[in-house]
Amino acid sequence: MNSRQYGFDDIEETVQADLDAEDDIVNGRTIPHEEVMAQAMQIIAQHGQRKRKAG
């Protein structure tokens, strides 16, 4: 059986990553969700193509 057991180091790494992410958010080092979605919609509008309906 090839299952992974989580140990202290794995949990510590996860906690540290969460703390780092929270610090990034607090200090404005992230891009707001609304901005990301607006950019995505703009890219789709420029490059996306609708599927043709058969029939």
Image: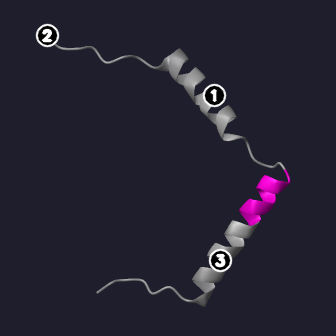
Quarter-of-image position of residue 21: bottom right
- In percent of the image, x 54 and y 16: which residue is there? 46
Position of residue 45 measured from the top left corner of the image (x, y, whole percent) = 52, 17
- In percent of the image, x 69 and y 33: which residue is there? 35
Position of residue 49 measured from the top left corner of the image (x, y, whole percent) = 40, 17
Whole-number angstrom distance, CA of label 2 to CA of label 1: 34 Å
Q: Secondary structure at mark 1?
A: helix
In the image, residue 17 lies in the stretch drawn in magenta: no
Q: Which of the image's four quarters has the N terminus?
A: bottom left
Left or right of 46? Residue 53 is left
Left or right of 23? Residue 11 is left
Name the residue type under label 2.
Gly
Return the disc, 3 or 2, that comes first in the chain's sequence.
3
User: From what the image shows, is residue 34 above or below residue 53?
Assistant: below
| Residue at which label 1 appears | 39
Left or right of 12? Residue 50 is left
| Residue at which label 3 appears | 13
Whole-number angstrom distance, CA of label 3 to CA of label 2: 54 Å
Most common secondary structure along the magenta stretch: helix
User: From what the image shows, is residue 29 above or below residue 10?
Assistant: above
Name the residue type under label 3.
Glu
Q: Which of the image's four quarters has the C terminus?
A: top left
Q: Residues within 10 Å of mark 2 (few under 14, many from 20)?
A: few
Residue range (magenta)? 20-27
- In percent of the image, x 65 and y 77: which residue is there? 13
| Residue at which label 2 appears | 55
Q: Secondary structure at mark 3?
A: helix
